[in-house]
Structure formats: C-alpha cells, structure tokens
Image (spheres, rainbow, N blue to C red):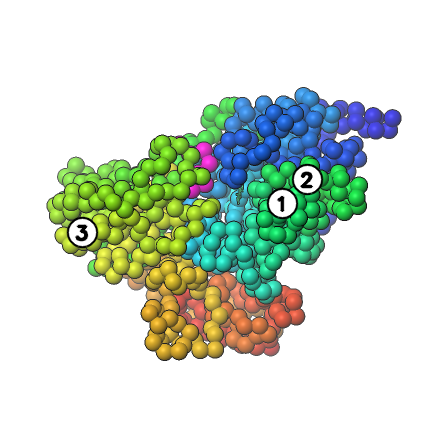
Amino acid sequence: MKKLTKLSLVILTLISGFYSCKPNKNMQDTSLDQALEQKVDSVLSLMNLQEKIGQTVQYAAGWDLTGPASTTSAKSKVDKMKKGLVGSVLNVTSVKEVREAQKLVMENSRLKIPMIFAYDVIHGLKTMFPIPLGESASWDLELIEKSASIAAKESAASGLNWTFAPMVDVSRDARWGRIMEGGGEDPYLNSVIGVARIHGFQGDDLADKNTIAACAKHFAGYGFGEAGREYNTVTVGEFELHNMILPPFKAAAKAGVATFMNSFNDIDGIPATGHKVLQRDVLKGDWNWKGVVVSDWGSIGEMKAHGFAKDTKHAAEIALNAGSDMDMESYAYEAHLEELLEEKKISLVYLDDAVRRILRLKFQLGLFDDPYKYCDEEKERNDIYTKEHLAIAREAAKKSIVLVKNENAILPVSKNIKSIAVIGPFADNKDAPLGNWRAKATYNSAVSLLEGVKAKVGENTKVYYEKGVELTVPTVKPGENQFLYPLKINTEDSSGILKAVEAALKVEIVFLAIGEDAYQSGEGRSQTKIGFAGLQNELLEAVYKVNKNIVLVLSNGRPMDISRASELLPGILVTWQLGSESGNGIADVLFGDYNPSGKLPVSFPRNVGQEPLYYNQKNTGRPSNDIHVTYSGYTDSEKTPLYPFGFGLSYTNFSYDNLKVDTETMSSEEKITLSVDVKNTGTVAGEEVVQLYIRDLVASIVRPVKELKGFQKLLIAAGETKTVSFIIDKEVLQFYTAKRKWEVETGEFMLFVGGNSATKMKQKITVE
Ligand code: BGC
C-alpha cells in the first residue's frame, strides 16, 4: 500500500515537473544537492530489483555498430524497453528515433524512468571540427570549448543527451590509431584541453537544452598499449600511472564531468573494467566523484578473453564490484546481477549506488522533468550545420595547422601568383578531412584543398590539379560506413604520376597534398608504418625532380615519419584532418590571411623505430645524444625527434629575453612569479604559445627531463614586446612521490620557458 502511494506520487510529480532541478555543477562536490538526493532516493525506493538492474543496461541500436555485432535481437531490446529494463541507448541519433525509443519506456513501463541517449560525438556532430589531436595543436582553450559547445548544441538538437568524449588518454605512440582522438603526449595539455571540452559539452547547466553530458575516457591506461597495438596490455608502475596517466582524469572529475568510461586494456594484469582500485578506491573514493562509470563496448564480457573471468556471470560480478555502473553491450548485468545478488557475490549497496548515479544524471539532464526535452524537430532543422557553426569550424581549422618548415619564407604565397599545382590524393579530397569518428557528417562534405585554393586566388592565377596517385583501392561504395573495413592501399597503379609531373613543370609552386586517409587512424587502426603509404613517395620524388618549390600539405591523424619530405621540401604544413572547412582553413594559412600559430601536441619522430617517442622522458644514467657509442640512443638514428613537442613556426619570429623570478627560494606553501619578455621581431603580427616547463632535479622518484606546467597563447604585434608571467606554486611543483601522495619535495627545480619543449632558456629555483 505504501509502495502504491509512492508510485502515484512519482507519476503525479513527473507530470507536474516536481522532479526538475538544476544539475550539480561539480560531480566531485561533497555536499550533493540534498533536494536532488531525496528525489533520487524516492525513485530508488519504488524500484524493484529488475528495474534497478535495468537502469545499468545500455543497448546499442542495431546500426552504426562500433564493436562486435550485438547478439540480442532488436525485438527483445524493444520488449525490455517497454518493461523499463533499459537505462540508456547508444547510436540512436535523430529526434524521430529518440522520441520513438523514449515512448516505448514512457508509454509502457511501470515507473516511466526516461532513458539517456548516447553517441560518439568526438569532433562535431554534423559540422565537423578538426580531429581532437589536430584541434589540440591550436593550444586555444577558448576555441576548443567553443567547438565542443557547438557539437553539444547540434547533438542536443538531434535528441542526444550524452557524448562519449573527451578522450583524455595520454598517448605517446604514433603507431596507435587512436592517438588521433586525444590531446597528445602530455598530461598537463590533456588535462586543460579535456576540461575545456567538458565545459563546452556540459556548459554550466546540464539541463539546458543545448548541453549534453560528457564522458572522460578511457579509464585508464588505454593510450599506453604496448607497441602501439590496439587494445594491448599496459605495463606501467604505480608512479607512472599516477603522474602520467591519471592527471587528465583527475582534472576531468574535478571539473564535474558527468560520466567516465573504463577501458579495454589490462593494466599490469588487471583489466581496467574490473579494476577496483582505479574505480572504487581512486575515482569514487579518493576523488569523491559522483558520476556514472560506463563500461566500454562489451568490455565486461571481454574479461573472459583476457582470462580474468571464467564466464559472463563471473565478469558481471567482477565489473560491478570494481565499480562499473553501466554495462554497454555485454548483456552481462541484465543476465546475471539478480543471481549474483542471491548468491551474495555482489551487494545491493553497490547496485543501489550504481542506480543512484544513473538516476542522478537523468535528473540533472532534466529528463524526469520532460523525457522528450531534447526532442525538438524545429531545433533539429535549425540548429545543425549552420553558417555560424561552419565559421567556427573554419576558425578551428586554421588555428590547428602547424607550420613546421618554411625555408626562404616560401610561405605565405601571394594571391597574385601566376600558377599553382595542387597535387596528390588529398588535393581535391572532400572526405578525408572529415576524419575518423565523424558522427553524422555527410560523406564528401568537406571543403577540399583545391576548392579552398581556388576560392582564394584571382582570375590571373592558373590553378592546376592532379591527383597523381590513388592512395587506396576502394573496398566499400562511396559513402558507406568504412568504420569496420580495413583500407586497401594502392601499390600498383602509378599511371597518374606523369600527369602530376607535367603539371608541376608548368607552375611556380606546388602544394603537395599527401599523407594518411581518415581511416588509417582511429579505433582499430594501429599501424607498424607511419610514412607515406602506397605510391606517395614515388609521387613526391617525381614531382621534386622537376620542381623544388613544394609545400607539403600533410594530411594526418597521427605523427608521421616525414623525414624525407623534411629533407627535401622547403615548406611543410601539418594539417591533420581539419573537418568541414578544411580547405578554406588551409588556404587562409597558405596565402597569409591567417598567420599560423599551431604547436605540435605530439613529437614527430625521425622514424617509426623511435616510437613511443615523447619529450617528457627520463634521463637514464647515460643521457648523451651521441650515436655509435654505448649511450642511450640508437646506433642508426638520432634519438631526438624530427620536430619536438610544442614546436610550430609563424610567419614572424619571436625572441625571448629577460627571464626572471621575483625570488629564487620558496617554501612549498609559497609561490614565485616568473616572467619573460617575448618580442615579435618580424614584420607581421603573430600569436605565440609561450610554454613553461619544469624539472625537479633530485627527487624521491626519477622525474622527467621536462614537464609542461603552463602556457599562454598571445597575439603580439610586429615589433611589440609582451611580458608573460607564470606563478610557480604547489600546483606546479607537486607530483606523486615515493610516499604515495601528491606533494612538493624540497630541493632544486629548473624552470624552462620558450616556444617549444626543446627550449634551453632556464632559471633555477629552490624549495626549502
Ligand atoms: C570505443 C569507445 C566508444 C564506444 C561506443 C568503443 O569501441 O572504445 O571509445 O565510445 O565504442 O561507440
């Protein structure tokens, strides 16, 4: 009787909007909104066991699969939804479909608890921004937040409430395909970029119609897979885990990210999905974070293949006990949690905690207030792929480009130049710039380089185009989802090279658009080779023979081996996959309408054998750079990168001078102000990313030779000098020490300042 009264109260209050509430801005906040908690508890108290378990179930729609195909039929999924036994659905991506799915629950189930709709909106929904690694090269946090907010707006207008982004995995291995999805090799850069993306997706209010829940993934270690091999085992020690891998996740938790996703890999033998220390002790314990942990696709079931669970039931037991709240596509929780409870292998306390977290998020998204609040056909018609969004996409594209070589100022090119040849498989490619993880982007919808160039020059400039070589041999029809198909590289047909040479012969400058296709990086796209695949090297050499005035416009989703190009060609632009406005953004840079300001978020190697390659390495006991001796390099290669982390040129030059500190000693509770004068010594205005690195010279565990701890991106007029200051305090100097806590150790620190990680400008300080 008591239950019935409560049930009618729920139904009544659902209608009256009693449940509506503002979200908690900070999921780490210990004083959770009491009113919200009461509502969560009141719903929980009405739920029977099956309904509770149902909330932990996440199903994928039967299309756009990003993992092994589901075994449960669509019909049984629908039946489960009708009974209120599904908490969330992924890959349902339009208002019409979301509404239909939500109706199944709202019109049939006992408690009418709305579902959450999730999708991988990684770098835009339909308006595509640069791939995350590329956008990270902008080091422009405001811009990154803005692009995420547009992605959120377009997603929310499509009925979605949750994106599986940002990926904040520190990734140092160019062979790993998913390096394209994160912020590169540095934990600090990944932290601040991750937080900017979270703010962009979530805004200040999750219940706002234009915001969606974000997801920090993949917790943890996924970017450290051995040999860059996808899903591979991770062997890192406790200190490396805390100092290198976890910081971006901690920052995300602190910033109030609504959800976390765990990862496919094992860490030192424990699959992350079943990692109790990581999820219960660190994330939900030490960090006191109150959001939802979703498993990765099928990762609960995959603990069987790891050899960590004997069957799916065992996997469910391990995962729930370890703190995975929601089961994405393993069908393990729905099948086994009830039985596991009866057998006392899991406790109701953990199940209730998982359900509470899921319900809390639904309240925060405003779904209890109006389960269809994201279902607005008018918004879907008007808020997606707008002119305003495309303008920001162009801004993001041009700011993400990194100029790594510009001999004899080959760039920028005058718009009155007489003749240009745009050559290569990416020269008129309207699809590759959309990148991997392209959500609902329309096939072939990006502005190609050729289109961008043609739109820039006047009638007097003759623009030739030749593809030269096909990079790939098509395996699927144009526009078909290539996600699950390996690319077939063309290694035979070189018939177009001659025409490319003829074009190169006629012109003043060649823009050579070669590199990697969008589907050479991304999930499941690890490679042992990171140079120019297929016949692109032949194309490069042939064109170079007849015209030395070449600018390489590199298409890439990872750091590539561009050593040969760097040896030969006077100009190199790293242009990643830049999204919908790619060609326009590149043309803005090529012709000087925008002075490039991007800096590499990953080291570019000299060869694949150097991987994993990262600047924040340790020194070893024999740190010399010499080759052919028994020092810690290689006998056949320099150990330094071709282009270091943080590097990028401008059409102007910057000089650094007058580095000083207000005092050279401090206690761990005090602070020092460091300042430096940065002068634009050239003739045009430009933006410089002024970077601060530290080195803890002697510590209880070996510290990296340099660690990024701050940066400022500034516009400096020609001839102008700006003084840049950084505060050096506990935040900057602390690390996870041998005492297993974050603290500052006394002793000497070297501070470095400059325009890239190879900077030698330094100042010593002492912490007493
Ligand atoms: C990926 C996740 C992604 C999920 C859902 C998995 O294969 O690892 O990052 O969010 O699929 O599409």
Judged from the image, the secondary structure of the residue bearing numbered disc 3 is helix
> Which residue, given by chain and number where applicable, does mark 2 sit on?
333
Mark 3 and mark 2 lie on one chain; the one further toward the N terminus is 2
Of the residues shown, which amino acid type is indicated by label 2? Answer: Tyr
Q: Nearer the viewer, mark 1 or mark 3?
A: 1
Where residue 360 appears, as percent x and y from the top left, is: 69, 39
- The dot on residue 300 is 1
The reply to whether residue 592 is visible in this rendering is no
Q: Are marks 1 and 2 in contact (CB under 8 Å)?
A: yes
Residue 9 as seen in the image, left or right of residue 129: right
Where residue 598 appears, as percent x and y from the top left, is: 37, 53
Of the residues shown, which amino acid type is indicated by label 1? Answer: Ile
Q: Say whether residue 439 is magenta.
A: yes
- The dot on residue 761 is none
Query: Between marks 1 and 2, how big is the CA–CA gap?
Result: 9 Å
Image point (39%, 46%), residue name = 520
Of the residues shown, which amino acid type is indicated by label 3? Answer: Ala
